[in-house]
Image (spheres, rainbow, N blue to C red):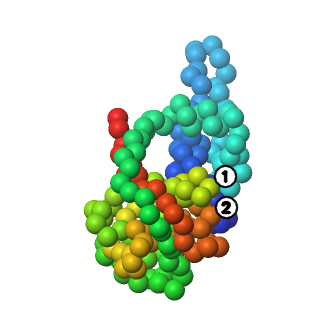
């Protein structure tokens, strides 16, 4: 179950939960029979219905749309660090989790969200800066294992990437 939730992503799970919990019964009139009480779905049922057009429409109408702008801040080589550092403290004070979408950058403020695009295959992922580094010459970013897996850089161990700062606009 946890692996399945990780695959579809936390924002999607939260959106599904919101759609399920906020579904309201139709209004009653004085001359109609009472409407049946809506049945709440379990989390498993909500996750299983991912891709259902009716559910996608319900989610889309109940959640605000957040637009994002991207500002390119650099290109260079990135690497990843995996399970060997799990549990160690990062520069932000939190513990390193190889399954989280985080990264280490030398100068960007902690908490900055970056879109990292693998230039070899065009795949991208959004990560949060929570640590300082890399301290290897020629590298501009160290990513977590989960983020590196999403952009297919696990095999070679490093990749040429483009970094863009994510800015939310209203």
Q: Secondary structure at mark 2?
A: helix
Give the CA distance from mark 1 to mark 2.
Answer: 8 Å
Q: Residue at x 71, y 46 (%)?
A: 49
For the residues carrying marks 1 and 2, which lies nearer the camera in this image? 2
Check if mark 1's residue and mark 2's residue have beta carbons within 8 Å: yes
Q: Which residue is mark 2?
A: 4
The percent position of residue 76, horizontal first and vertical second, equals 44, 63
Q: Is residue 170 above or below residue 41?
A: above
Q: Residue at x 33, y 61 (%)?
A: 111
Q: Which mark is residue 169?
A: none
Q: Give the mark nearer the N terminus: 1 vs 2.
A: 2
Which of the 4 image quadrants contains residue 141? bottom left
The percent position of residue 155, horizontal first and vertical second, equals 65, 73
Q: Is residue 105 visible?
A: yes
Q: Which residue is mark 1?
A: 47
Which of the 4 image quadrants contains residue 64? top left
Q: Which is more toward the observer, 24 or 50?
A: 50
Q: Secondary structure at mark 1?
A: helix
Q: Which is more toward the observer, 30 or 26?
A: 26
The percent position of residue 34, horizontal first and vertical second, equals 64, 25
Task: Pick the quarter of the image with the C terminus.
Answer: top left
């Amino acid at each position: 179950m946890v692996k399945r939730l990780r695959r579809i992503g936390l924002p999607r799970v939260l959106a599904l939960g919101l759609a399920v919990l906020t579904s309201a019964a139709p209004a009653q009139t004085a001359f109609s029979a009472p409407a049946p009480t809506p049945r709440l779905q379990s989390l498993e049922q909500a996750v299983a219905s991912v891709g259902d057009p009716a559910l996608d429409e319900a989610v889309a109408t109940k959640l605000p749309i957040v637009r994002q702008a991207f500002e390119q801040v650099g290109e260079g080589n990135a690497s990843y660090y995996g399970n060997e550092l799990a549990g160690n403290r990062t520069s932000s004070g939190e513990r390193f989790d190889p399954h989280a979408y985080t990264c280490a950058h030398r100068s960007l403020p902690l908490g900055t969200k970056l879109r990292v695009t693998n230039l070899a295959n065009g795949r991208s992922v959004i990560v949060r800066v929570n640590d300082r580094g890399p301290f290897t010459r020629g590298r501009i970013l160290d990513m977590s294992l989960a983020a590196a897996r999403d952009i297919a850089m696990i095999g070679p161990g490093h990749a040429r990437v483009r970094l863009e700062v994510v800015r939310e606009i209203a």
